[in-house]
Amino acid sequence: MGRQFFGTDGIRGRTNAGVMTAEIAMKVGQAAGTHFLRGKHRHRVVIGKDTRLSGYMLENAMVAGFTSVGMDVVLLGPMPTPAVALLTRELRADVGVMISASHNPYEDNGIKLFGPDGFKLSDEDELAIESMLGQALPLADSPQIGRARRIEDARGRYIHAVKGSVPHNIRLDGLKIVVDCANGAAYQVAPSAVWELGAEVIAVGVTPNGKNINDKCGSTHLDLIKETVVASGADIGIALDGDADRLIVVDEMGQTVDGDQLMALIGTQLHQRGELRGGGVVATVMSNLGLERYLNAQGLSLERTKVGDRYVLERMKEGGFNVGGEQSGHMIMLDHGTTGDGTVAALQVLSALVQSGKKASELLHLFDPVPQLLKNVRFSGGKPLEAESVQKVIADAEAQLAGRGRLVIRPSGTEPVIRVMAEGDDAAEVEQVVDAICEAVKAAV
């Protein structure tokens, strides 16, 4: 069976349409439960969710699926994706589930699965589960049907864990910090963790109503946090996305600090302490050439992967790296977790701010990004990138940028769109190259 359900980050779609229905969620629970029924112990699954209205429906459907095949369920309620990964391991569960569509609007939802080690499932596991979705699976005998319970101290466990990612002598006293939780999964835990370390916290995006997740707030909509930081005279702002595995920072002047700058900071800080493994940082093909040049100047490498935090993580594990991420704000620090964690990343940044004694604007802008331009070309069918005319324009652009820039062209994994990105020292040349390729793709459609 091909990948009809699983994409690059679990299963995702508009709720009550396509693959994101209660019926399919129940079947995913049955299939994942069956796949992880290994050994004679009492089996357990941990389920968390963000704050979307549809989370109630999908959570209950998955409980029905897992319990029907004999797996006990532990419900966490609204919790960040990295908290689910953490508690899957801590509770000795066989599988973990996060119900979330990350930074997407509330109408969408998704299902992410974690193995007993807290890492996202391998392609092999996902394909095995997908192959069972169309089958009639054996149900548990009546005495073996699973039970469900909700644990009340999940938030406290996660807050304790993320605070443990910074040295005990680090305090945030005297700092005024804006925390934007995108009305999402971290609306309780992130402000609490920062406050417990001593900071004055101004929390925004912490009044979820089921429909306002990521709505004009969070890491993909920065106007709110920028305005709040400047108006309140805050020292720094940290913006998370709906499931809190991404972080974007705003300095005291309201300037954006993206994932590339954060990787530069965290990577070089660890390198200076002799704690960076792998000799560099892992990022995707979308990370700015300026980051690569900066790391190279520090004697460090930048390893690039396909777009998607799962590919970053795979390369980190293969090469022994402990820092990786994406320009969009996914930050993976394997010393502190098994997946991207915006709150842990934020605490590393805040720790560095305290230790440096500098303002955020002085600490967090380590390199000047090379001019970069990304445009999307929508198409209705076919394979426009295979057209000879398009390939010629791409080859000409690569030759033009050789040694002075980069070109990344890829189809979207979630919609019929070709993404065309170029970067180089000459902004006008970058724009000319991108426009030429976009026109060639449109003409080939």
Image: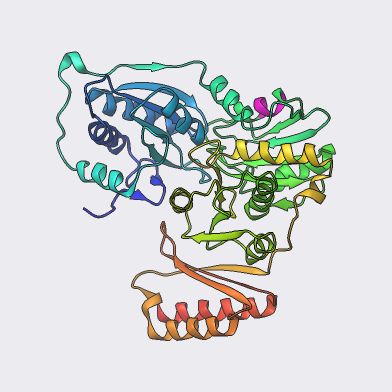
Q: Is residue 123 left or right of residue 412?
A: left
Furthest toward the top, the residue is 143
Asked if residue 151 lies in the magenta stretch, the reply is: no
Q: Residue 331 location in percent, x, y?
A: 57, 46
Question: Up-down: is 183 above or below 248?
Answer: above
* Quadrant (top left, top right, bottom left, bottom right) of the C terminus: bottom left
Q: Quadrant of residue 287?
A: bottom right
Q: Is residue 341 left or right of residue 91?
A: right
Q: Quadrant of residue 234?
A: top right
Tell me which residue sits at (51%, 46%) in the image.
Answer: 104
Q: Residue 144 location in percent, x, y?
A: 20, 17
Question: Up-down: is 86 above or below 415?
Answer: above
Tell me which residue sits at (44%, 53%) in the image.
Answer: 311
Asked if residue 192 lies in the magenta stretch, the reply is: yes
Q: Residue 386 location in percent, x, y?
A: 37, 78
Magenta range: 191-195
Q: How many marks?
A: 0
Tell me if I can see residue 405 in this picture.
yes
Tell me which residue sits at (61%, 79%) in the image.
Answer: 403
Question: Up-down: is 15 above or below 40?
Answer: below
Tell me which residue sits at (57%, 27%) in the image.
Answer: 161
Q: Residue 273 location in percent, x, y?
A: 68, 43
State whether the magenta stretch is mostly helix, strand or loop.
helix
Tell me if I can see residue 207 in this picture.
no
Q: How is the image coloured?
A: rainbow
